[in-house]
Image (cartoon, rainbow, N blue to C red):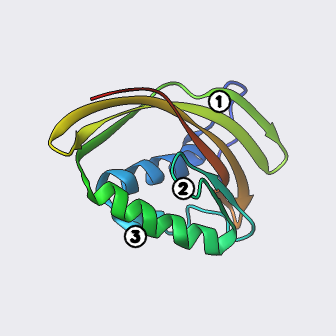
């Protein structure tokens, strides 16, 4: 059973999904995504077409597109900032997560700052991603 959430932010169990998502993006290892996403309806908002991915079919499409995308990026690394705007209602939590990405694309180093908004749901004793949206606030190459 997950530990109770603190009043100011997500606990370690709640951060497991975002951490696994970041590891997938760094490694393109789809195995790290097992059990990360909700088994029900879900929504992913991204900054690349088609921008909105819904349900399990959308998740499958997102996985394929992201695996190709991250395969074209070298030395991708993330650093999370402190989670923000945490709220919990029963078995649902929301928080935003500032994130910095660095890597190499097309032979050029880049530095991207952005953030995720996450909605997690407690399913079968695990916090799973029910929805997320990604937004870039700055990009330098």
Are the residues flagged by discs 1 and 2 in contact, CB closer than 8 Å?
no
Q: Quadrant of the N terminus?
A: bottom right
Q: Residue furthest right?
A: 90
Q: Which mark is residue 89?
A: none
Q: CA distance from mark 1 to mark 2?
A: 31 Å
Task: In this rendered view, identify the residue nearer to me: 98 or 67.
Answer: 67
Residue 1 visible, this angle: no
Q: CA distance from mark 3 to mark 1?
A: 27 Å
Q: Earlier in the sequence, mark 1 or mark 2?
A: 1
Question: Mark 1 Cα within 10 Å, few/some/many (few <14, many 20+)?
Answer: many
Vertical order, 14 against 35 (above or below): above
Lateral position of residue 138 relative to residue 56, left or right: left
Vertical order, 138 against 59 (above or below): above
Report which residue position mark 2 lands on. Answer: 49
Where does residue 116 sit, x and y in percent of width and height?
57, 38
Lateral position of residue 5 relative to residue 19, left or right: right
Residue 27 visible, this angle: yes
Where does residue 140 sit, x and y in percent of width and height?
32, 25
Which picture quadrant has residue 70? bottom left
Where does residue 13 sit, x and y in percent of width and height?
58, 48
Task: In this rendered view, identify the residue nearer to me: 52 or 79.
Answer: 52
Report which residue position mark 3 lands on. Answer: 31
Report which residue position mark 1 lands on. Answer: 9
Vertical order, 20 against 29 (above or below): above
Where does residue 124 sit, x and y in percent of width and height?
70, 67
Q: Quadrant of the C terminus?
A: top left
Lateral position of residue 75 relative to residue 12, left or right: left
Task: In this rendered view, identify the residue nearer to me: 132 or 80.
Answer: 132
**What element does badge 1 sit on?**
loop
Are the residues flagged by discs 3 and 1 in contact, CB closer than 8 Å?
no
């Amino acid at each position: 059973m997950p530990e109770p959430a603190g009043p100011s932010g997500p606990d370690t169990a709640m951060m497991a999904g975002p951490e696994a998502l970041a590891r997938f993006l760094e490694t393109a290892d789809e195995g790290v995504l097992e059990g990360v996403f909700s088994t029900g309806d879900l929504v992913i908002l991204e900054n690349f077409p088609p921008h909105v991915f819904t349900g399990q079919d959308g998740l499958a499409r997102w996985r394929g597109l992201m695996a190709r995308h991250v395969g074209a990026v070298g030395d991708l690394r993330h650093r999370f900032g402190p989670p923000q705007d945490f709220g919990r209602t029963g078995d649902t939590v929301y928080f935003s997560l500032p994130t910095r990405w660095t890597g190499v694309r097309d032979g050029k180093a880049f530095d991207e700052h952005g953030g995720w908004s996450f909605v997690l749901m407690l399913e079968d004793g695990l916090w799973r991603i029910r929805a997320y949206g990604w937004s870039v606030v700055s990009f330098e190459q």
